[in-house]
Amino acid sequence: MLSGIIFDFDGLILDTEYAIYQAWLAIYADYGGSLSFSDYSKGIGTVADAFDPVGYLQGQISIPIEPVEMLKRQQELSHKWIISQPPLPGIIPLIEEAKQKGIKLAIASGSPREWVFGYLSLFGLQDRFDAVFCKEDVLVVKPDPGVYLAALRAINQPADRVTAFEDSPFGVTAAKAAGLYCVAVPNRLTIQMDLSHADLVVRSMEEVTLDELSHCLATRSNGTHKR
């Protein structure tokens, strides 16, 4: 029954979201500012300018900020943390098993291609996926379903045989709007957010098996899905 899996990238394959937030917290602390998760979370899983951390900090302090330099510092801090951590638990075994079984794999991300492909390459994952779609490949990012629909077309599988994995509310909304069965796997940031509109919420990818996903898709088609 399961013939395709489409993964989000940030916070789902690599814990990039936590690293970026921690980098901003360090920068804000240096300037004597504060950044609550409720404010920062407005930009998780959607267009980058949904929340402007530089502008938000500038509004708290009197000295002028150089946005380019600050963004460069944030990227350097977060990059060091990202490359020091392995992919999130369960993701590699699930990918490897799916490849062995001939299941098509894709990524549907709202991040830039340079970012996604850069980290896929660093972690040796660039050849694991049949298709990768990013911010530049669609007119509108999540919660619009466009990136999922593009990935679905690329792997040439019917929506009722494909599962999406997401970590954010906007991502879940996009996957569901594309007609996909969606499993939410919150990370240490998005566990604080409402993911109840996903078909299934698990604490880790280690809790999910391909057999269970096939069963969920089969029972979903007749309206009897329960875990």
Image (cartoon, helix red, strand yellow):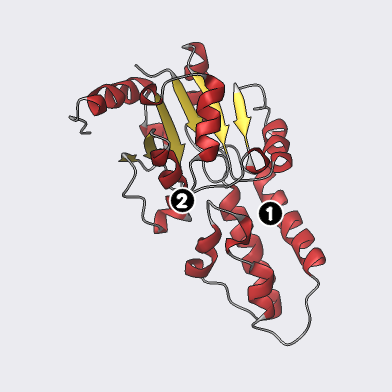
Residue lying at 58% horizontally and 47% vertically, measured from the top left: 140
For the residue pair 182 and 153, the one nearer the viewer reads as 153
Residue lying at 48% horizontally and 41% vertically, measured from the top left: 145
Q: Is residue 150 above or below residue 210?
A: below
Q: Secondary structure at mark 1?
A: helix
Task: Identify the residue position indicated by label 1 in the image.
Answer: 78
Q: Position of residue 155 (x, y in %)?
A: 53, 21
Q: Position of residue 75 (x, y in %)?
A: 73, 55
Q: CA distance from mark 1 to mark 2?
A: 22 Å
Q: Is residue 92 visible in this depiction of the protein?
A: no
Task: Identify the residue position indicated by label 2 in the image.
Answer: 170
Q: Amino acid at mark 1?
A: Ser
Q: Secondary structure at mark 2?
A: helix
Furthest residue toward front = 139
Q: Amino acid at mark 2?
A: Phe
For the residue pair 132 and 27, the one nearer the viewer reads as 132
Q: Earlier in the sequence, mark 1 or mark 2?
A: 1
Quarter of the figure with the C terminus: top left
Quarter of the figure with the N terminus: top left
Q: Position of residue 168 (x, y in %)?
A: 46, 49
The quarter of the picture where residue 192 lies is bottom left
